[in-house]
């Protein structure tokens, strides 16, 4: 049986997404990683991903080892392939947060153990699975739901759009001109059976939506664009007006970290409609589920 990796949501079929979400409910799972290591390599900072994934490994009886980029030199001190072929000798799963998505592909091409994407410039699948779990817990099902992602079209929105396609939810992007999704991404969403539309006003994207979602305007690695982006994203803050445009039962999600006063107002993120802490907790439950799923299959 060939090894399975998770680099993007569409590495999982719709049924497999459902299976992972089901596994996320196993809060007292078997110790399937007893005596095993899981490597976590980080080229960028992390609070949620490192802590949630490390704790997921512990809950499965394994031992997580987190490594910072400067002690690994992924692609500089040695090649991505050599790093993967070394780490697989110690670990049952290799996880990595990288700038260039291609680094993960190079590791996955040679690794005999699963490679898990902890965020790349292209995608953030573990985040999208936690987002799905949060929506499922809150609404009971995905049927007929609309998710409005408002802000910078980025790694988080791409994985979320694919996750919506996999679960039958309608997806809307609300982005200023020049910051929307590529045609290639839109075609991918469509090819997965998804429905996506692009809007250049936040209230239009949010209109009647069940979920209003946002992320930072300047992702890690784009900090030098922060000032220009603050100007470009004027009018895209999720505040009371945007939440009023959503469905009366609509909720607010954010992958975090949040910048209050930029992509979201303090009032909205602290409101009763905000599920961001439940969403952050779900990172651990879905990380554990992904490890269970991949280890079982590989
Ligand atoms: N949402 C998320 O991935 O958070 P971290 O960058 O803190 O891991
Ligand atoms: N888009 C953000 C997500 C952080 C979790 C970034 O890449 O920095």
Image: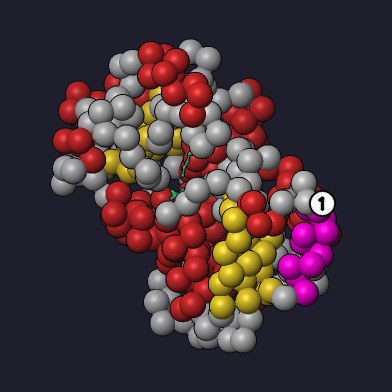
Q: Dividing the picture into quarters, in which one does residue 64 lie?
A: bottom right
Q: Position of residue 254 (x, y in %)?
A: 35, 42
Image vertical order of residue 189 relative to residue 60, above or below? above
Q: Position of residue 69 (x, y in %)?
A: 63, 52
Q: Dividing the picture into quarters, in which one does residue 202 lie?
A: top left
Image vertical order of residue 57 relative to residue 256, above or below? below
Q: Position of residue 8 (x, y in %)?
A: 62, 48
Q: Which residues are magenta?
A: 78-89
Helix, strand or loop for the magenta stretch, by majority = helix
Q: Is residue 146 left or right of residue 104?
A: left
Quarter of the figure that contains the C terminus: bottom right
Q: Dividing the picture into quarters, in which one does residue 86 lie?
A: bottom right
Q: Is residue 47 left or right of residue 159?
A: left
Q: Which residue is mark 1?
A: 79
Q: Is residue 202 left or right of residue 68?
A: left
Q: Nearer the viewer, residue 133 or 144?
A: 133
Q: Residue at x 20, y 35 (%)?
A: 266
Is 79 in the magenta? Answer: yes
Secondary structure beneath dot 1 equals loop
Q: Position of residue 169 (x, y in %)?
A: 44, 42
Crowding near the residue tagged with mark 1, few <14, some 14–19, many ≥20 C-alpha atoms within 10 Å: some
Q: How many marks?
A: 1
Q: Residue at x 23, y 31 (%)?
A: 265
Is 237 in the magenta? Answer: no
- Is residue 51 in view? yes
Q: Nearer the viewer, residue 208 or 102?
A: 102
Q: Residue at x 30, y 57 (%)?
A: 278
């Amino acid at each position: 049986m060939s090894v399975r990796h998770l680099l993007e949501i569409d590495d999982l079929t719709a049924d497999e997404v459902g299976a992972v979400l089901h596994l996320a409910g196993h809060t007292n799972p078997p110790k399937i990683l007893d005596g095993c290591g899981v490597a976590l390599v980080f080229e960028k900072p992390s609070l949620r991903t490192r802590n949630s994934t490390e704790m997921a490994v512990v809950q499965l009886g394994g031992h997580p080892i987190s490594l910072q980029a400067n002690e690994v030199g992924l692609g500089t001190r040695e090649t991505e392939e050599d790093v993967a072929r070394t780490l697989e000798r110690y670990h049952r799963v290799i996880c990595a947060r990288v700038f260039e998505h291609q680094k993960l592909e190079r590791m996955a091409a040679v690794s005999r153990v699963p490679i898990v994407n902890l965020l790349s410039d292209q995608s953030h699948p573990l985040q999208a699975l936690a987002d799905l779990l949060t929506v499922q817990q809150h609404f009971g099902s995905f049927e007929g739901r609309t998710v409005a992602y408002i802000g910078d079209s980025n790694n988080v929105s791409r994985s979320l759009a694919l996750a919506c396609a996999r679960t039958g939810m309608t997806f809307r992007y609300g982005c200023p001109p020049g910051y929307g999704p590529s045609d290639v991404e839109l075609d991918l969403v469509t090819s997965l059976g998804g429905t996506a539309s692009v809007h250049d006003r936040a209230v239009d994207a949010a209109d009647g939506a069940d979920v209003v979602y946002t992320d930072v305007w300047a992702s890690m690695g784009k900090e030098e664009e922060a000032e220009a982006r603050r100007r470009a994203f004027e009018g895209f803050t999720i505040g009371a007006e945007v939440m009023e445009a959503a469905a009366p039962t609509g909720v607010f999600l954010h992958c975090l970290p949040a910048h209050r006063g930029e992509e979201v107002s303090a009032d909205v993120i602290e409101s009763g409609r905000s599920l961001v802490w439940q969403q952050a907790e779900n990172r651990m439950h879905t990380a554990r589920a992904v490890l269970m799923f991949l280890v079982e299959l590989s």
